[in-house]
Amino acid sequence: MKIRNSEHEIGSDFEIRNSNLFRISIFGIRILAFLFLANPAFAMGDVPSVTTTEVMNPTLTYVRSFGTPGSGERQFSYPRDVKTGNQQGGLDQLFVADTGNNRIEKLDADGGFVSQFGGFGQGAGQFNTPDGIAVDLNYRIYVSEKDNDRVQQFDIRGNFLQSVASGELGMRALLEPAGLAVDNSGGLYIADSGNNRIVRLGYFGDFYDEIGGFGTGPGFFNHPQGVAVDRDRTFYVADTGNSRVQKFDGDGHPLFAFGRYGSGPGDLNNPGAVAVDDKFVYVADTGNDRLCLFGKDGKFLLACGARGPGDGQFNAPLGIGLGGQGRVYVADSGNHRIVELKLGY
């Protein structure tokens, strides 16, 4: 299925990709139907068998935390996301969605205060419950707002540039947009949680397509809160209400899901965010107060953290930011701080 704007393609098409996936697009609405018996590898939660000769034993080690409750510099109120400029473009700074204070705080890699922008309101450059952040290769900063139902774009200094994803996108406006991600070509991915879909925009903010709809089957979501894009344009969705992560190919076809509701190894409880690097998939297992690490084949590797305010503990972890030299940053929302971990393998 493809939903395109008027510059590309619009209308009805019917495509059979294989014997067990039918994709229909009727007037911009995506419908997915699966024949589970034809290929059980597509069943919810099943992970395909992958043969690899690379053996890795990753570790996540607590480094430090920074931030205290409050509204001053380097203070936070229920931060929901953290991103770095390093993963996309080499800028070693942090951008924190300081949700309760309706602002974005910019910090250096060591957690030192640099600047802030925003403030409560509905006008350009103002926020009402900022939720997700993404930074692209040109250092444009995107911020989603759950209660203003929009995404705004800023330059690296925090100057407002434009609103994106405004109006109807695939016959529906955004509703409680959450996590954001950008791909290598500057395309924007939005976890449109209230509409149970992922919306994709082009570099200039033009509508590209949408994936999902409410449900529990492959390709459907229950209030997705996070999205992450790999270099090959495969992408991962934190399917929060279904307590799983789904992986899609670059065309938006569901590949497989991993995780199920629970608290054991490989289980998830309302995951709130997902991130991906060259080797691993990171999941903020929000309901279990931990960070989980998976292989790109969906294999569970490790879990880090437990509920509490101490070193290496979390209280409702949400956003994940990946920095240079194995730095992993977590928005520890309930503890009003950012936690830094170190990846080793």
Image (spheres, grey):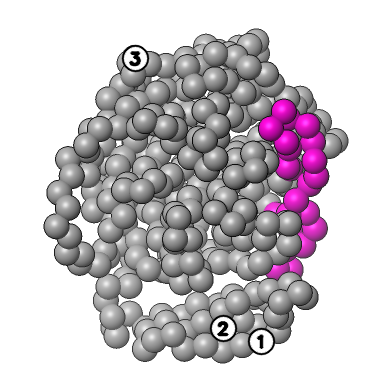
Q: In this rendering, does residue 9 appear at all? A: yes
Place residue 139 in its image quadrant.
Answer: top right
Q: How many marks on residues?
A: 3
Query: In the shown orientation, is residue 154 left or right of residue 21?
Result: right
Q: Which residues are magenta?
A: 152-174
Residue 4 left/right relative to 31: right
**Vertical placement of 187 versus 176: above or below?**
below
SS assignment at label 2: strand
The residue wearing badge 3 is: 310
Please tell me which residue is depicted at 43% across the width and 45% down the height of the picture: 274
Report which quarter residue 291 is drawn in.
top left
User: Which comes before the other along the chain, label 1 or label 2?
Assistant: 1
Is 173 a magenta residue? yes
In the image, 73: left or right of 251? right
Please, what is the three-letter code of the amino acid marked with disc 3? Gly
Is 241 placed left or right of 344 in the picture? Answer: right
Q: Which residue is mark 1?
A: 12
The residue at the point 65 percent across, 43 percent down is 138
Between 261 and 343, the one nearer to me in the picture: 343
x%, y% of residue 13? Answer: 61, 88
Specify whether residue 305 is painted magenta: no
At label 2, the amino acid type is Ile
